[in-house]
């Protein structure tokens, strides 16, 4: 489901329209983060001593409640889901970040090694050469109209020669280029500021995500916590069952050895044949093999529990408790209809599915917002520098067209540098997109209908799950009561058989049969207890039983 939420955030874009909306959203998210951190710290404090003891290599004895609290704080899979919750919060904040002005700084330097002639292929290049005629005409007009008889009009060639001589006397050398506008070095630095004023997606995308995304992820986390507790309980009971099976098998081995001792005495007294002693020895060897197998199964079950608790496999832990200590009869008389009504109101996964419908509705509104315009405000601040290699400028002296003076300008002279400022509003409105928006709306309607169908299907599945778990729990209780009575009979039967063997009126075969019946009955009884406990845990998970806060130290 977290992947679906990431897709939702990316597709919505989460734009922002009003700046003031950010402050309550950010403060609310921060407050929620603070509350979560407080709850997690309290839970961690309850199990930190046990965790530190395990990490230090000490042999730690755990109760079931302690194991459940440790799993809620140490389980790595659950920690990943908590990280998904935090990641969703970060994604919402990322969307709200569009509320702030977007500031971009750009800067570049260009060296024009060779600039193309912009008038290549046309006669416009001669225009700049003809500008020299204006100076010649102005000089001759002044010579004709002034009162000085010594000044006379001159030819254009003489004008150019005298002007070139004046430039040479002043030490000025003009550059020749095909492009009179080319500048060798060009600098540009600009700051662009863009502020969203209106974007329809913010009304449904960012606001909807900030309202529903966190509850969506938190409901998923709550459900995973319930499932984890169910798995931890199942693993805990599996370890206890395996340890009980080891004890039962050990007792069986001990009884077989006592039987072997009795048969050996009878053989030595000549009252029993040797093959009975051989049979007893084979029986002891077989049971010792079964004992090794049950011990291996118990070790594997304990490793599985360590994995769920978040402990390394090499650490040593022991369990405090027994299978029968958690037996309860409170659920056997429950009515499926009343329990189902309560479960439908508090199952986190169903609440998450309902929130999913809300999110799909937001997706639909986001798709429709594509029909609305977007309005942005922008401001641009630019600094431009056009710096030539030859920074020498010249000017005529006292208006004499043949006498010049030159001036050397620095690299940062204001003549080469300038700035510009522009501000404005930008309206973007898609008028026609080939009916793509209409098709996206249809897709979102279908997705919303599918989400509603998922809610309905999950509600029915919850009802079936509750009915099945309740039937399983009742059947397990009936098997348990039957096996409890049968266990008393099997123990009494073995006691009689062993006494008869000591008196010499029973055979070792009868004792072994009674011992086998007792072992099998004990196994069946322990399995029945285990099945009841697992059925209880499964039923509690099916009805969405809330996780009770720990009251232990």
Image (tube, grey):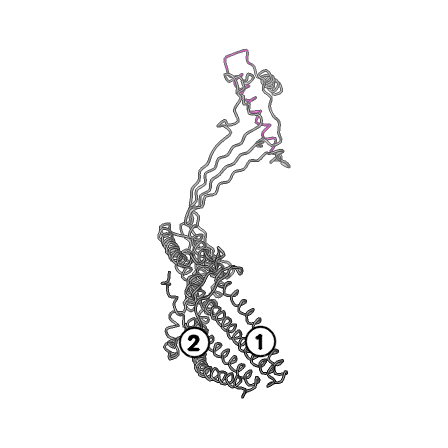
Disc 2 to disc 1, C-alpha distance: 41 Å
Percent x, y of residue 226 = 43, 67
Residue extent of the magenta highlight: 124-151
Can residue 145 be found in the magenta stretch?
Answer: yes
Q: Secondary structure at mark 1?
A: helix
User: Mark 2 or mark 1, which has the lower sequence index?
Assistant: 1
Percent x, y of residue 399 = 51, 18
| Dominant SS in magenta | helix
Point 37% across, 73% down: residue: 342
Point 55% across, 86% down: residue: 510
Q: Which residue is mark 2?
A: 466
- Of residues 39 and 376, which is closer to you in this image? 39
* Residue lying farthest to the bottom in this orientation: 505
Q: Which residue is mark 1?
A: 287
Quarter in which the C terminus is drawn: bottom left
Q: Secondary structure at mark 2?
A: helix
């Amino acid at each position: 489901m977290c992947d679906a939420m990431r897709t939702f955030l990316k597709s919505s874009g989460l734009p922002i329209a009003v700046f003031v909306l950010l402050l309550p959203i950010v403060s609310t998210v921060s407050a929620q983060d603070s509350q979560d951190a407080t709850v997690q710290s309290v839970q961690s404090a309850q199990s930190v001593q046990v965790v530190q003891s395990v990490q230090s290599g000490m042999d730690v004895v755990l109760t079931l409640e302690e194991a459940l609290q440790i799993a809620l704080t140490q389980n790595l899979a659950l920690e990943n889901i908590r990280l998904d919750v935090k990641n969703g919060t970060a994604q919402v904040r990322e969307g709200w970040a569009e509320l702030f002005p977007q500031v971009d700084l750009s800067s570049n330097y260009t060296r024009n090694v060779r600039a193309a002639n912009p008038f290549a292929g046309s006669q416009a290049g001669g225009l700049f050469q003809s500008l020299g005629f204006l100076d010649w005409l102005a000089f001759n007009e002044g010579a004709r109209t002034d009162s000085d008889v010594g000044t006379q009009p001159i030819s254009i060639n003489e004008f150019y020669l005298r002007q070139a001589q004046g430039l040479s006397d002043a030490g000025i050398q003009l550059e020749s280029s095909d492009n009179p506008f080319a500048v060798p070095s060009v600098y540009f630095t600009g700051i662009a500021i863009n502020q969203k004023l209106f974007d329809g997606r913010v009304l449904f995308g960012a606001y909807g995500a900030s309202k529903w995304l966190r509850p969506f992820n938190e409901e998923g986390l709550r459900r995973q916590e319930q499932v984890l507790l169910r798995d931890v309980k199942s693993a805990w009971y599996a370890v206890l069952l395996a340890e009980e099976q080891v004890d039962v098998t050990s007792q069986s081995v001990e009884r077989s050895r006592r039987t072997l001792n009795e048969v050996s005495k009878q053989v030595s007294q000549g009252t029993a044949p040797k093959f009975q002693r051989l049979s007893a020895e084979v029986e002891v060897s077989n049971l010792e093999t079964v004992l090794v197998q049950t011990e291996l199964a118990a070790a594997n079950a304990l490793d599985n529990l360590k994995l769920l608790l978040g402990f390394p496999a090499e650490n040593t832990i022991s369990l405090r408790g027994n299978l029968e200590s958690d037996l309860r009869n409170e659920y056997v008389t429950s009515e499926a209809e009343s329990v189902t009504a309560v479960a439908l109101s508090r199952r986190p996964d169903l609440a998450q599915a309902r929130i999913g419908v809300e999110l799909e509705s937001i997706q639909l509104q986001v798709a429709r917002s594509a029909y609305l315009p977007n309005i942005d405000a922008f401001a641009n601040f630019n600094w431009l520098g056009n710096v030539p290699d030859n920074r020498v400028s010249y000017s005529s002296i006292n208006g004499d067209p043949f006498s010049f003076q030159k001036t050397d300008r620095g690299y940062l002279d204001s003549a080469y540098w300038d700035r510009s400022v522009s501000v404005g509003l930008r309206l973007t409105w898609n008028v026609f997109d080939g009916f793509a928006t209409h098709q996206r709306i249809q897709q979102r309607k279908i997705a919303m209908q599918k989400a509603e169908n998922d809610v309905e299907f999950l509600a029915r599945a919850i009802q079936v799950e509750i009915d099945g778990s309740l039937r399983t729990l009742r059947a397990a209780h009936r098997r348990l009561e039957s096996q409890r009575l049968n266990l008393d009979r099997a123990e009494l039967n073995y006691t009689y058989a062993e006494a008869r063997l000591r008196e010499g009126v029973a055979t070792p075969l009868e004792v072994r049969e009674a011992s086998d019946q007792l072992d099998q009955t004990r196994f069946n009884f322990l399995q029945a207890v285990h099945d009841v406990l697992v059925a209880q845990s499964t039923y509690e998970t099916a009805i969405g039983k809330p996780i009770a806060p720990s009251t232990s130290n």
